[in-house]
Every structure is written in structure tokens, then in C-alpha cells.
Amino acid sequence: MISPAGGPRVLGLDPGSLRTGWGVVEPAPDGRRLSLVAGGTITSPAAWPFPERLRHIFEQLADIISRHHPVELAVEGVFTSHNARTALLLGQARGVALLAGALAGLSIHEYAPAAVKKALVGTGRAGKEQVRAMVEAILKQTLPPPREFSLDASDALAIAVCHLHSRNIRGLGGRP
Amino acid sequence: MISPAGGPRVLGLDPGSLRTGWGVVEPAPDGRRLSLVAGGTITSPAAWPFPERLRHIFEQLADIISRHHPVELAVEGVFTSHNARTALLLGQARGVALLAGALAGLSIHEYAPAAVKKALVGTGRAGKEQVRAMVEAILKQTLPPPREFSLDASDALAIAVCHLHSRNIRGLGGRP
């Protein structure tokens, strides 16, 4: 979906094997700010067999894409600060998330977590609470408390915001 | 598909981000040995965008499952000998492979690579060529040369064979 301002509706994702945060952002009709469309957290209980957790993430994402019609997907990029076992678990959830986007025909963009934090807060070492506060300021919207709208969901919004800002800087969108 | 001998048809998988080996094995009609049904390699060119590589793996696996009707999936389990970056890449391919199995309703079983080698060759440090030779001996079938039937494909057959042996040992299959 292309918003009235001509910019793309973006799905941001913070994938994880237990919780996948998601958030949809688009340029507001005035073309000068960004609006929150929807967001939330896909939880896949640790007690489920792992393939069922992957299936749940995939099916929920396919549902979110069909409900909100994003045209671009922004997702946390490859990073190597985890140990190999954690990276493999994360990779499996991330692979399923990328697949859901590819099957829906979304254009897919990756941002390193530190780059997202730096773009929004000014430092790559910002905490999730700082990122959330900046997301609220940029979207001019108070988010529900973390027990209702998780820090993974606000991280996902941050990735979408970072992508829309970076897109404008690169001259791909926004008004002339 | 349940073979005439009553055992399950098993899809073995050796997932990777560039090459995913696959092989389908089932108990032969005489119930005393195992038969090769089909096998091969899914290659996803490194030049493709990563999400397209994942999509290709997923769609090829879905096609293999619909053509050969395995009822169980045996896949290399989590291991941590890789560095974090390699593990994340591998994890993404593996996640998509597990998802294809889960969406098709296959029961999914994981085996550590060293356990597969030990079960077939007697040592967890066996090379891929040794594994391939033992697969040929067990299936009583000469495989085409590696340039036609890759070492990843013979590894996938080894995982399927390991699963069927382990299944018999656990008393889950075979004839009384």
C-alpha cells in the first residue's frame, strides 16, 4: 500500500525464536511525519516443538502482511555478537520471517541493530527503553506499557522508522 | 507414504544457505533393507538476494515433498562448531527447511552430524566420502559421481538412513 503522501507502508521486524516484534509505519498524509499503523508481538511458546514455533511465526506474519499490506520489509540485519547456538536459533526465526516477506513480494531491507539505534537515538549502544521513547516522539504517539506492547514491538517500529528515514535520505521516497 | 513393509518413507535433509542436500529413503518391500527413492541437491546461487535464496529452498522442498510423499523428516540437528555468522546463515536455511516440513505435516526428527557419522561409519569424525561409501553399501546402490549427486545429497541420505535405523532400534517401525 502506498500512503497518500506517496511513501511506502513499511513492516519492521525484530525476529526471535520466542518473540518476534512487528510494527507497520507509513508516511502521514501531510508527508512530513510518520504514522503508526499497527504493531505487536508474535509469541511462540518455548514448550512447543521448534518446527511448530517456526510455523506459528510464519503463519502470523503472512496474516499480518495480508491485513496491513506493507510493500517493504525492514528487518534487523546479520550480526555476530551472539554465540553460535543463539545465532542458529535466531537464524531459523529470521529465515522464516524473510521467507514470509519474499513470498508476499515485499522488497526487503536489512539494518544492523546498532545502526538503527544510532539513527534514532544517536548512539549504537542505546537501550530498548531509549529506542522506545524516541519511537514515541517520532510517531507522536504514546505506546501502551511494555507488558501490552513489548520492547520487541517498539524495536520493530524503530527498524521501520529507520528504513523510512534512510529511504528519504537516499532520495527514494517522500515529497520533492 | 507407508512402504509395503510398513515403515515410513523418510526425507533426509542437510540444509545450507548455498546447497541443501536431500534424499528420500524407505524400507524395501522385503522389510529387511532400505531403498533409495530419490535424492539430489537444491542449489541457490550466491548472487541471488538472500530472501530469494530462502524462497527457492522452500519452494523446491515443498515440490519434493509433494512429489515423493515422505511422512517423516530427518534433519541435521543444532551444532555449535561454526562461528556465529556461519551459524546464523545456516540457521536461516534450516528454519525454512523445518517450516516446509511442518507445513506439510511431517513428523520432524533431528540428529547431530557426529551422531549420524558414528551410526553409519563408527566414528563421529568420518569424512563425507566415507559416509557416502557406507550409504551406498547400506542402500545397495552405487550413487552417481559427486559432480552429479553431491556430497550434501549423500549426507542427506545418511541422515534418513540413521533415522530409520534409530527408529527400528527404538521399536517404532519395521516388521515384528
Image (cartoon, coloured by chain):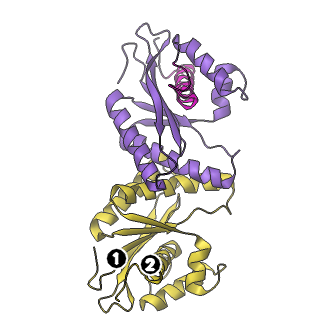
Chain colours: A yellow, B purple
> Could you tell whether A24 is left or right of B16 in the image?
left
Q: Is residue B72 above or below residue B58?
A: above
Mark 2, residue position = A167
Q: Judging from the image, what secondary structure is the residue with disc 1 in?
A: loop
What amino acid type should be assigned to the residue bearing mark 1?
Pro
Picture quadrant of residue A27: bottom left
Q: Amino acid at mark 2?
A: Arg
Q: State whether the magenta stretch is mostly helix, strand or loop.
A: helix
Image marks 1 and 2: residues in contact by CB distance under 8 Å? yes
Which quadrant, please, contains the N terminus of chain A?
A: bottom left
Q: Residue at x 37, y 34 (%)?
A: B65
Magenta range = B144-172
For the C terminus of chain A, the image quarter is: bottom left
Residue at 67% from the left image edge and 52% from the top image edge: A84
The answer to whether any part of residue A152 appears in the image is: yes
Residue A8 — which label? Answer: 1
Q: Nearer the viewer, residue B162 or A47?
A: B162
Judge left or right: residue B62 versus residue B53: left
